[in-house]
Image (tube, helix red, strand yellow):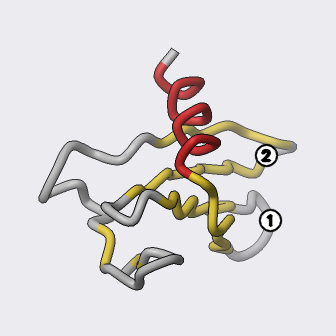
Amino acid sequence: MVRCCACGAILDPDGTEKARPPSISGSVMGDEITETCYCVACRVYTIEVVRDRFLGEESVSYHVPVPKERGDRQVALISA
């Protein structure tokens, strides 16, 4: 379960309430890294980063808080 870093609202990881959140994946030396951007009414992005390690355990971290303007730019790059 992902919570908004600003207001604490539960964010919908499966995209069942709204459209799926923007997400991008890439590989770095065999590790797959996925960034998913969540935004709620408080106008702050919470960015979840999942690293699926080729040799090792998966890790999850969060880049927070990301101002709406910066998050919007990142989402625009993902959408391009």
Identify the secondary structure beneath mark 2: loop
Residue 62 located left or right of residue 7: right
Residue sitting at x 14%, y 57%: 16
Whole-percent x, y for residue 15 in the image:
23, 54
Residue type at numbered disc 2: Gly
Q: Is residue 79 visible?
A: yes
Q: Quadrant of residue 38?
A: bottom left
Q: Of marks 2 and 1, which one's residue comes earlier in the chain?
A: 2
Question: In the orientation shown, which residue stands out farthest toward the right?
Answer: 29
Residue type at numbered disc 1: Leu
Quarter the N terminus occupies: bottom left
CB under 8 Å between discs 2 and 1: yes
Classed neighbour count for the residue bearing mark 1: other residues with Cα under 10 Å, few (<14), some (14–19), many (≥20): few
Whole-percent x, y for residue 11 in the image:
32, 70
Whole-percent x, y for residue 57 in the image:
70, 76
In the rendering, which numbered label is found on residue 55? 1
In the rendering, which numbered label is found on residue 30? 2
Residue sitting at x 63%, y 58%: 66
Residue sitting at x 27%, y 45%: 20
Compare residues 2 and 64 and report the one nearer the observer: 64
